[in-house]
Image: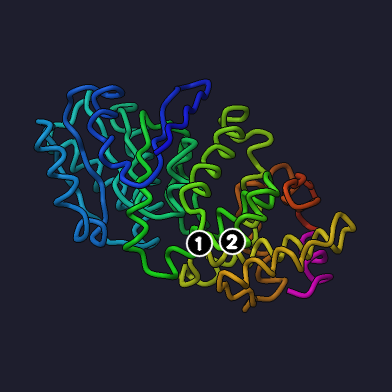
């Protein structure tokens, strides 16, 4: 196991990552939030697999807790679910001195984080991610959100956790396609920040899982510490996401986040080639194909451009594209939003 210290302007906290890290949950609770009541948010899949493990730890340590279970999947990440959880905490008498515990994947983590940030104007939060995707992405860095009808993650807040427990053993129960979703995000870190990680992933993540998780968290930590509220370089973490989110939305979320981001990274590489920035389409497509991703795009340039117009990275008539310059380095490339369609039409999606 490894402890990774995160120091943001608003809060410092530890991320404990590795096989068996869940055994550090109680010491982390005692050190970061003290003895308080815990409001656990989880989903039906995670609850059926791990509820006895988590509740056994709480009971043995004398922690009082309540639990709210949502249906798994992106469809639950909406304002209605958020407010239902808030009402549940209020009805159970959760106070400002208590703590929300997110126990699940990215949907649970985003919902729980947003709820913690607004309940009684903000209470403590512990993240226990159970998917590879949430371990390397959403559990660290303080971004929380729900989806609106107009687009993904359009309502949210920045709210850092008090501690994060990333037990890589949880990934052993994931379906192949769910685990693969997380691989897309790890590959993303290699493309944008670390060519050595990218090379290592070429040999298969199963041969370096704990290293890949820790390294991804460290890379995200380094970016978040310098740009907590996403006003500058943190934007590079969105590599593949502008196009990926558009594909998710167009598919009514039948294309998973990781699968959509994989497609989005390839589109971004093609755009970079069209603009003369780099020609990395072969390298990026190659590693994604080796992990089993379907890189075909079922949507037209017009559909993707239209969907991308609701992206959060659009501002003052410009859209910031994150494009690869070389493996290990990306650039933020602002374009006039109304030129996106012609740019996409110029590349073969």
Q: Residues within 10 Å of mark 2 (few under 14, many from 20)?
A: many
CB-based contact (under 8 Å), mark 2 and mark 1: yes
Q: Is residue 235 left or right of residue 74?
A: right
Nearer to us in this view, 228 or 50: 50
Q: Which residue is mark 2?
A: 261
Residue 286: x %, y % from top left:
69, 69
Q: Which residue is mark 1?
A: 257
- Decide whether residue 346 is among the magenta residues: yes
Q: Is residue 308 left or right of residue 77?
A: right
- Decide whether residue 219 is among the magenta residues: no
Can residue 249 be seen by looking at this rendering? Answer: no
Q: Which residue reaches farthest right?
A: 276
- Range of magenta residues: 340-349
Look at the picture and state if 176 lies above or below 226: below
Residue 278: x %, y % from top left:
85, 57
Which residue sits at x=53%, y=20%?
9
């Amino acid at each position: 196991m490894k402890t990774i210290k995160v120091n943001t302007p608003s809060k410092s906290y530890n991320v404990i990552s590795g096989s068996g890290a869940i055994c550090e949950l109680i010491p982390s609770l005692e050190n970061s939030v003290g003895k308080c009541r815990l409001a656990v948010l989880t989903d039906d899949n995670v609850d059926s697999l791990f509820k006895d493990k988590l509740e056994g730890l709480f009971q043995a340590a004398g922690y009082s807790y309540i639990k709210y279970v949502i249906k798994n999947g992106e469809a639950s990440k909406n304002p209605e679910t958020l407010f239902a959880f808030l009402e549940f905490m209020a009805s159970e008498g959760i106070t400002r001195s208590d703590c929300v515990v997110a126990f699940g994947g990215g949907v649970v983590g985003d919902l729980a984080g947003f709820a913690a940030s607004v309940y009684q104007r903000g209470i403590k939060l512990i993240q226990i991610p159970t998917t590879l995707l949430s371990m390397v992405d959403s559990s660290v860095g303080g971004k929380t959100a729900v989806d609106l009808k107009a687009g993904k993650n359009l309502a949210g807040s920045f709210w850092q956790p008090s501690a994060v427990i990333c037990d890589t053993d949880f990934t052993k129960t994931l379906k192949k396609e769910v685990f693969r979703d997380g691989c897309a995000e790890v590959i993303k870190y290699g493309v944008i920040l670390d060519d050595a990680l990218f090379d290592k992933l070429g040999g298969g993540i199963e041969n370096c899982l704990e290293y890949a998780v820790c390294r991804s968290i460290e890379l995200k930590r380094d970016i978040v510490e310098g740009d907590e509220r996403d006003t500058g370089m943190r934007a590079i973490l969105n590599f593949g996401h502008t196009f990926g989110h558009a594909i998710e939305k167009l598919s009514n979320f039948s294309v998973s986040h990781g699968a959509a981001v994989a497609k989005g990274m390839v589109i971004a590489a093609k755009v970079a080639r069209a603009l003369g920035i780099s020609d990395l389409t072969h390298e990026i497509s190659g590693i994604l194909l080796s992990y089993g991703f379907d890189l075909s795009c079922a949507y037209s340039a017009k559909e993707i451009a239209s969907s991308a117009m609701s992206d959060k990275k659009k501002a003052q008539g410009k859209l910031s594209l994150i494009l690869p310059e070389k493996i290990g380095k990306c650039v933020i490339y602002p374009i006039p939003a109304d030129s996106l369609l012609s740019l996409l039409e110029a590349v073969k999606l």
